Amino acid sequence: MPTSRTDETAPNRKRGRGADPARTRQALTDAAFDTLRAEGFRGATARAIAARAGCNQAAIYYHFQGIQPLLIASLQASSARRLVHYRRLLGGVTDPATALARLDELHAEDVASGHLTVLAELVGGITAEPDLRPGLTEAVGPWLEFVADTIRNATDSFPWAASLPAGDVADMIFSLILGMELQTKLDGDADRFSRLMNMGRLVVAVLPAR
């Protein structure tokens, strides 16, 4: 699901003295996300982001106190939107096959919107900028909780559900998805996640229900 842009955040809007602070912050957040998506972590400089937002570089430091907090804010904004959508489509789903089908669709949206690209770029940037870690951890936390809850709901009908460490499984799933995104950057294979979902369907088909 592509990130929407409104005319309020277009580059020709006023960004200098007297500009609406909320609009400027939104323009910078959108620009940071788009720059990370298009140019990568190395290309997400103050100059590139400010140019895309149509404002002065000083606005970044005024509103976000630096590049790193702005980059994290751009991911957190996207993450919050995506999590609402995930909860709407997966909340209460108790059938594993349905959950897998919807996850396949949602993952495709994450790729198309650039959300996974931005996440991978920022995770990769931790080596150069370790201060990114707390903000990334904060952004990822709600996802791990959501995935664990979804696993519990989808496996509740199986006799071994009570002994399943849903939190650990959620951590492994998230790590796997992130790893696949990084691997796709190497070989361009965009179908890897769908193949994983197909394997998941085969496993679900042979598991005995209660």
Image: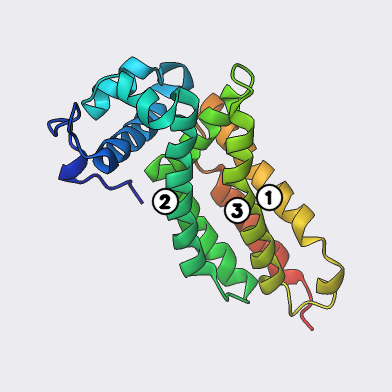
**For this view, does 203 lie left or right of residue 135?**
right
Q: Residue at x 64, y 70 (%)?
A: 96
Question: Which residue has dot 1 on it?
Answer: 173
**Earlier-in-chain disc, 2 versus 1:** 2
Question: Which residue has dot 2 on it?
Answer: 109
Q: What x and y, as percent, mark residue 185?
A: 52, 28
Q: Residues within 10 Å of mark 3 (few under 14, many from 20)?
A: some
Question: Which residue has dot 3 on it?
Answer: 143
The span from disc 3 to disc 1 (Cα, nearest Å) is 11 Å
Q: Secondary structure at mark 1?
A: helix
Q: What x and y, as percent, mark residue 85?
A: 44, 61
Q: What x and y, as percent, mark residue 65?
A: 44, 26
Tag 1: amino acid: Ile
**For this view, does 87 lie left or right of residue 205?**
left
Q: Residues within 10 Å of mark 2 (few under 14, many from 20)?
A: some
The span from disc 3 to disc 2 (Cα, nearest Å) is 16 Å
